[in-house]
Image (cartoon, grey):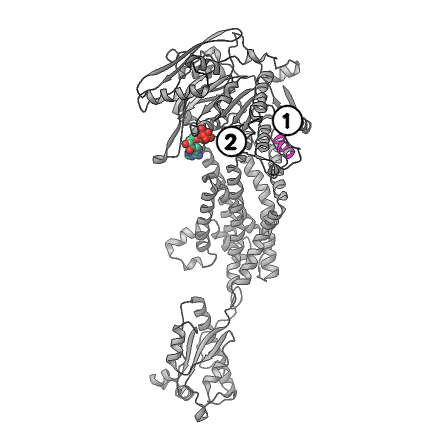
């Protein structure tokens, strides 16, 4: 027994007393009854556990054997509380996993998942320190365990990074993580896979036996190497979601009169395959422990299709005992009573399981018996699971030491990958730079064909550059006012010019008629009484390649501006009022903004928000999906960390990232590219920051929905385009059909972009509804997404 106190709080890791006396009966560390578990829903639903029963005695080693895909990992994940059964019961150390009394997930269990589940950027020492902080263990204890396990498991130097270790060394570090806090129950999913075959039986199994014999710890270990499990006290042979047999290796071999467990397994599989009807296989063996004799009856009951097909092992009520509670444990610590009874290996490793006749005492009765004893009476089967789903488990208050461990871990990983870290900070600024450098600028070098029929050098009609009040070669005079962005390319004939336009050589054709200047003069002098022919002949005709709308708009704008300036200038030179005769619509100073606001200024608010938002989405989804895929999330959760703590820890990390990214984006947009902000800058930064958190929460939602990186990536990409086009980033919402506007406003970024635009361009403050709506709706999104995540996490325990 070890008492490890840190900062006043106390974590007690107790070892178990192996009792074999008749009164206490055999203590069970794990009981599973009639467990069913399916993955997926509807037509994709597949049953993995099909009415499975399992009993693991305290202080024993239980080898769970079965072929790949038979449901071993699924079963273990239900034991450690990472998944929930669809129906049936699980008791771990006397309680349902996930309840505060069970301590599972938590320090009472050591879990080694099939995946490596180690942070590759941590050293071996940092790995144990991280989990030590999660368990609130004293640093001195962690260090001594590190020293001990390094020798025991032949680990490399503790300052070696996990990523630099060989596969086998990494597996042993993973094993050390499961062991080092001395849990009562060790659940090891294929600990020997990838480990040096020479080391496998020697180190790992020897250590497991010592854990069970010397310290009374319970070990459940899955393996594909059937013979390896001969060293276990009990073997559960699993196939297609059921246990075919559960007994000591010796008894199984004796019963079947076979020399290897592989043969036994094979025979059981054949029996299962052959016995499609109601045949039964009974294994009876008398088992003696030091003080008592139990009769084992293992019964494989193969029923008609659709009915249960499993061994049902039943126990008398008095065989079930409660785990020692904290008070008892503490009392024992105070009285210096040793929890460990040194036991002779051969005595302890006698088959500890008593299996009674299925018919004599039903599984449900047995579970009720447990409930009465443990005061955790639950209805069995689907009803019980449904009740649990309704009730849920009480929410755990986030613990400071676990939060500290998570935050520290996140920062350590960030700083270890300093290149990636800097890149993450700089990427939004880089994106903002790309935006400013590439977008919103006026197009240049646009070739326009000029067909000027006024020109005729043979008759002295050449372009003169007069600026006085003379009706002479006005076509040339007009052309001088066209912006340099348009490159004027002279063409002799209209047909050639049009052909060049069709061939994409020019963006359009400007055509002046033969008598343009004369006709223009007539039109001026005759005014309202002029005729249609004159109007047509005095026109400047333009054909534009409108395939590019933006260029079309620019050409039209520049040609009209050129005419306005030409006409004003001409009127002025003739001593007329410059504005006389020009269209009587005038655009005075704008209410907000400035005349000819560049497109970049319209897009800037949307761009700032979308950059920060999408960075947060991808960073969060990326981190969580990767952690889940590597088994790191599972390992932390089994160690007792809650999703709420993981979210808070991640938010801390994201807080600095979003702050940094927001600051750099604003510096880039406002200081380097001079995007004006008329309003309160702090308010604009705050809204952007909130949107970063909305993005983070959306990333969490993606993580809770998606099981793999590809789906998460697809989902975040799928959300990108609708948000970009409908969030009002590049096109005004007012330009959308009415039915789409409601959808646009239901996007998480839309109101925030409107807010930011109002602050940037109008200088509005928080008192304006357009501004505070962005803040309130962002907060509402954060809360709703977080709640949705927690609901999905809870419900997915039952479906995936
Ligand atoms: N999240 C999931 N969604 C859908 N099916 C799943 C999921 N996880 C596992 N399965 C399926 O459930 C079955 C049992 O998987 P499980 O991982 O429990 O098997 P296993 O006995 O541990 O196999 P192995 O020894 O290869 O690890 C397999 O067919 C697997 O494809």
Residue 94 visible? The answer is no
**Residue 529, located in which quarter of the rendered image?**
bottom left
- How would you rate the neighbour count of disc 2 (Cα within 10 Å): few for under 14, some for 14-19, many for 20 or more? some
Q: Which residue is mark 1?
A: 149
**Residue 123 appears left or right of 286:** right
Relative depth, front residue between 680 and 307: 307
Query: Alpha carbon of mark 2 to alpha carbon of mark 1: how far?
Result: 20 Å
Q: Position of residue 546 (x, y in %)?
A: 40, 69
Where is 65 relative to 735, above or below? above
- How would you rate the neighbour count of disc 1 (Cα within 10 Å): few for under 14, some for 14-19, many for 20 or more? some
Outermost residue toward the right? 140
**Residue 144, located in which quarter of the rendered image?**
top right
129 drawn magenta: yes
Dot 2: element: loop
Q: Which residue is mark 2?
A: 114
Where is 170 relative to 317, above or below? below
Give the mark, 2 or 1, whose residue is nearer the N terminus: 2
Q: Name the dominant secondary structure of the magenta segment.
A: helix
Outermost residue toward the bottom? 459
Dot 1: element: helix
Q: Residue at x 48, y 21 (%)?
A: 91
456 drawn magenta: no
> What segment carries the magenta color?
125-134
State the mark number for residue 732: none
Q: Position of residue 272 (x, y in %)?
A: 36, 21
Q: Position of residue 38 (x, y in %)?
A: 40, 30
Q: Position of residue 596 (x, y in %)?
A: 51, 68
């Amino acid at each position: 027994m070890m008492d490890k106190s840190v900062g006043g709080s106390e974590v007690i890791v107790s070892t178990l007393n192996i009792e074999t006396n008749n009164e206490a009966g055999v203590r069970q560390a794990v009981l599973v009854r009639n467990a069913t578990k399916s993955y997926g829903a509807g037509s994709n639903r597949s049953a993995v556990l099909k009415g499975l029963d399992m009993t693991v005695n305290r202080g024993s080693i239980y080898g769970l054997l079965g072929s790949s895909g038979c449901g071993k990992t699924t079963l273990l994940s239900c034991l450690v509380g990472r998944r929930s059964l669809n129906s049936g019961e699980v008791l771990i150390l006397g309680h349902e996993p996930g309840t505060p009394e069970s301590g599972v997930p938590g320090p009472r269990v050591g879990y080694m998942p099939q995946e490596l589940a180690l942070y590759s950027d941590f050293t071996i020492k940092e790995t144990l320190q991280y989990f030590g902080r999660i368990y609130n263990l004293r640093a001195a204890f962690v260090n001594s365990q590190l020293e001990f396990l390094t020798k025991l498991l032949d680990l490399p130097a503790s300052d070696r990074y996990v990523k630099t270790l060989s596969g086998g060394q990494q597996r042993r570090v993973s094993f050390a993580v499961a062991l080092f806090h001395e849990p009562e129950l060790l659940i090891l999913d294929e600990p020997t896979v990838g480990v040096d075959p020479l080391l496998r039986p020697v180190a790992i199994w020897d250590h497991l036996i010592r854990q069970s014999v010397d310290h009374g710890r319970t070990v459940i270990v899955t393996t594909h190497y059937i013979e390896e499990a001969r060293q276990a006290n009990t073997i559960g042979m699993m196939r297609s979601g059921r246990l075919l047999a559960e007994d000591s290796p010796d008894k199984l071999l004796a019963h079947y009169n076979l020399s290897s467990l592989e043969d036994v397994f094979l025979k059981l599989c054949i029996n299962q395959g052959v016995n499609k009807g109601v045949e039964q296989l009974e294994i009876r063996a008398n088992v003696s422990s030091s003080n008592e004799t139990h009769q084992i009856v293992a019964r494989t009951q193969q029923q008609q299709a659709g009915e249960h097909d499993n061994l049902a092992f039943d126990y008398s009520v008095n065989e079930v005992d409660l785990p020692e509670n904290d008070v008892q444990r503490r009392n024992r610590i105070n009285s210096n009573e040793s929890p460990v009874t040194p036991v002779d290996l051969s005595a302890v490793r006698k088959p500890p399981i008593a299996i009674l006749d299925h018919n004599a005492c039903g599984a449900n009765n047995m579970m009720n018996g447990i409930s009465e004893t443990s005061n955790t009476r639950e209805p069995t089967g689907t009803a019980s699971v449904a009740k649990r789903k309704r009730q849920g488990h009480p929410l755990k208050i986030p613990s400071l030491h676990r939060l500290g461990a998570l935050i520290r871990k996140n920062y350590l990983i960030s700083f270890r990958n300093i290149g990636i870290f800097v890149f993450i900070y700089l990427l939004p600024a880089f994106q903002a730079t790309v935006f400013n450098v590439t977008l919103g600028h006026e197009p240049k070098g646009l070739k326009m064909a000029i067909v000027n029929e006024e020109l005729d050098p043979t008759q002295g009609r050449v372009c003169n550059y007069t600026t006085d009040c003379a009706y002479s070669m006005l076509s040339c005079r007009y052309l001088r006012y066209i912006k340099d962005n348009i490159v004027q390319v002279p063409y002799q004939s209209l047909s050639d010019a049009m052909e060049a336009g069709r061939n994409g050589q020019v963006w359009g054709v400007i055509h002046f008629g033969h008598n343009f200047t004369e006709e223009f003069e007539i039109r001026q002098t005759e005014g309202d009484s002029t005729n249609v022919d004159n109007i047509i002949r005095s026109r400047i005709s333009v054909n534009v390649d409108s395939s590019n709308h933006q260029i079309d708009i620019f050409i039209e704008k520049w040609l009209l501006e050129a005419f306005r300036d030409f006409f004003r200038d001409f009127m002025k030179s003739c001593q007329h009022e410059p504005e006389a005769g020009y269209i009587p619509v005038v655009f005075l100073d704008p209410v907000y903004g400035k005349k000819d606001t560049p497109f970049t200024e319209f897009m800037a608010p949307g761009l700032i928000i979308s950059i920060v938002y999408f960075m947060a989405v991808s960073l969060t989804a990326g981190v969580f999906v990767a952690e889940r895929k590597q088994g790191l999330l599972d390992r932390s959760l089994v160690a007792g960390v809650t999703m709420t703590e993981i979210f808070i820890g991640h938010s801390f990390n994201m807080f600095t990232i979003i702050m940094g990214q927001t600051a750099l984006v604003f510096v880039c947009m406002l200081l380097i590219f001079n995007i004006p902000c008329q309003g309160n800058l702090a308010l604009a930064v705050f809204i952007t920051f909130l949107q970063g958190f909305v993005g983070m929460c959306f990333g969490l939602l993606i993580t809770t929905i998606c099981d793999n990186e590809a789906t998460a990536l697809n989902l975040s990409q799928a959300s990108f385009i609708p948000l970009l086009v409908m969030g009002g980033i590049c096109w005004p919402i007012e330009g959308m059909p009415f039915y789409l506007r409601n959808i646009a406003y239901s996007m998480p970024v839309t109101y925030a972009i409107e807010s930011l635009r109002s602050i940037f361009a109008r200088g509005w403050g928080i008192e304006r509804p357009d501004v505070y709506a962005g803040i309130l709706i962002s907060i509402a999104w954060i809360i709703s997404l977080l709640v949705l995540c927690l609901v999905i996490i809870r419900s997915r325990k039952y479906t995936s």
